Image: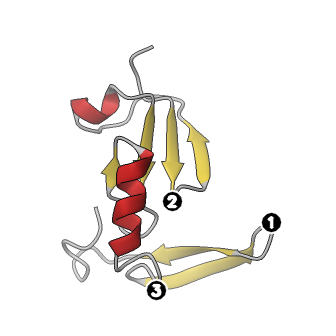
Amino acid sequence: DERLQRIILGCRYMIETAYDGVYPEYYSKHSELWICDGCFRYFANKQLCIRHANACPLIAHPPGDEVYRDRCVGDGFISVFKVNGDQQEGKVR
Protein backbone atom coordinates (compact mmCIF):
# COMPACT_ATOMS: atom_id res chain seq x y z
CA ASP A 1 0.00 0.00 0.00
CA GLU A 2 1.66 3.23 -1.18
CA ARG A 3 0.27 5.65 1.35
CA LEU A 4 1.20 7.09 4.68
CA GLN A 5 -0.02 4.65 7.35
CA ARG A 6 1.65 5.93 10.55
CA ILE A 7 2.99 9.14 11.99
CA ILE A 8 5.60 8.87 14.71
CA LEU A 9 5.65 12.04 16.81
CA GLY A 10 8.85 12.72 18.72
CA CYS A 11 10.10 9.14 18.32
CA ARG A 12 7.65 8.15 21.08
CA TYR A 13 4.05 8.29 19.92
CA MET A 14 2.78 6.21 17.01
CA ILE A 15 -0.41 7.48 15.40
CA GLU A 16 -2.25 5.41 12.80
CA THR A 17 -3.54 7.55 9.95
CA ALA A 18 -7.13 7.36 8.77
CA TYR A 19 -6.60 9.26 5.52
CA ASP A 20 -3.82 10.80 3.46
CA GLY A 21 -2.39 14.10 4.61
CA VAL A 22 -1.14 17.02 2.55
CA TYR A 23 2.56 16.17 2.68
CA PRO A 24 4.84 16.43 -0.36
CA GLU A 25 4.74 13.37 -2.62
CA TYR A 26 8.19 12.16 -1.50
CA TYR A 27 6.99 11.80 2.11
CA SER A 28 3.55 10.45 1.23
CA LYS A 29 5.09 7.42 -0.48
CA HIS A 30 6.57 6.16 2.79
CA SER A 31 4.51 4.07 5.18
CA GLU A 32 5.78 6.08 8.19
CA LEU A 33 6.46 9.77 8.70
CA TRP A 34 8.64 10.90 11.60
CA ILE A 35 7.79 14.32 13.08
CA CYS A 36 9.86 16.41 15.51
CA ASP A 37 7.72 17.19 18.55
CA GLY A 38 9.46 20.53 19.02
CA CYS A 39 9.12 22.22 15.64
CA PHE A 40 6.94 19.71 13.72
CA ARG A 41 9.47 19.31 10.92
CA TYR A 42 8.94 15.94 9.23
CA PHE A 43 11.36 13.26 8.08
CA ALA A 44 11.25 10.09 6.00
CA ASN A 45 13.15 7.98 8.52
CA LYS A 46 13.96 7.63 12.20
CA GLN A 47 17.69 8.35 11.92
CA LEU A 48 17.13 11.78 10.33
CA CYS A 49 14.50 12.63 12.94
CA ILE A 50 16.81 11.68 15.82
CA ARG A 51 19.72 13.65 14.36
CA HIS A 52 17.47 16.70 14.01
CA ALA A 53 15.98 16.30 17.51
CA ASN A 54 19.46 16.31 19.07
CA ALA A 55 20.02 19.81 17.65
CA CYS A 56 16.48 21.25 17.61
CA PRO A 57 16.26 24.29 19.91
CA LEU A 58 12.49 23.86 20.30
CA ILE A 59 12.60 20.35 21.83
CA ALA A 60 13.02 21.58 25.41
CA HIS A 61 10.23 24.13 25.16
CA PRO A 62 8.13 24.71 22.04
CA PRO A 63 7.24 28.29 21.13
CA GLY A 64 4.03 29.77 22.47
CA ASP A 65 2.12 29.53 25.72
CA GLU A 66 1.42 26.27 27.53
CA VAL A 67 -2.37 26.00 27.86
CA TYR A 68 -2.72 22.44 29.19
CA ARG A 69 -0.56 19.94 31.06
CA ASP A 70 -1.39 16.47 32.32
CA ARG A 71 0.55 13.56 33.73
CA CYS A 72 1.36 10.77 31.29
CA VAL A 73 1.99 7.15 31.97
CA GLY A 74 5.40 7.01 33.63
CA ASP A 75 7.32 10.05 34.79
CA GLY A 76 6.48 12.53 32.04
CA PHE A 77 3.85 15.10 31.19
CA ILE A 78 1.94 15.90 28.06
CA SER A 79 1.48 19.57 27.28
CA VAL A 80 -0.48 21.54 24.72
CA PHE A 81 0.87 24.88 23.50
CA LYS A 82 -0.97 27.74 21.85
CA VAL A 83 1.20 29.19 19.08
CA ASN A 84 0.52 32.55 17.45
CA GLY A 85 1.65 32.20 13.83
CA ASP A 86 2.14 35.95 13.45
CA GLN A 87 4.61 36.03 16.36
CA GLN A 88 6.32 32.67 15.74
CA GLU A 89 6.68 32.93 11.98
CA GLY A 90 9.30 30.57 10.57
CA LYS A 91 9.82 28.67 13.82
CA VAL A 92 7.04 26.14 13.45
CA ARG A 93 5.67 24.40 10.39
Q: Position of residue 54 (x, y in %)?
A: 40, 71
Type of amino acid under label 1: Val
Q: Which residue is mark 3?
A: 65
The amino acid type of the residue labelled 3 equals Asp
Instruction: Say which element carries label 2.
Output: loop
Residue contact between numbered discs 3 and 2, judged by CB atoms under 8 Å:
no
User: Which residue is the site of mark 2?
Assistant: 10
What is the x, y in percent for residue 11?
Answer: 53, 55
Q: Quadrant of the N terminus?
A: top left
Judge left or right: residue 15 versus residue 51: right
The answer to which of 56 and 61 lies nearer the viewer is 56
Location of residue 4 (image quadrant): top left
Q: CA distance from mark 1 to mark 3?
A: 23 Å
Q: Earlier in the sequence, mark 1 or mark 3?
A: 3
Name the residue carrying label 1.
73
Q: Secondary structure at mark 1?
A: loop
Q: Which mark is residue 5?
A: none
State the residue at coordinates (42%, 53%). 35
How many residues crowd mark 3 within 10 Å: few (<14), some (14–19), many (20+)? Answer: few
Closest to the observer, 7 or 89? 7
- Residue depicted at 62% across the width and 78% down the height: 68
Nearest to the eye among marks 1 and 3: give it: 1
Give the crowd class for mark 2: few <14, some 14-19, many >=20 residues within 10 Å.
some
> Regarding mark 3 in the picture, which secondary structure is present there?
strand
- Vertical side of 26 occupied by 68: above or below: below
Q: Dot 1: few (<14), some (14–19), or many (≥20) neighbours within 10 Å?
A: few
Sooner in the amino-acid sequence: mark 3 or mark 2? 2
How many angstroms separate mark 3 from mark 2 (CA)? 19 Å
Dot 2 amino acid type: Gly
- Image quarter where the C terminus lies is bottom left
Q: Residue at x 60, y 56 (%)?
A: 12
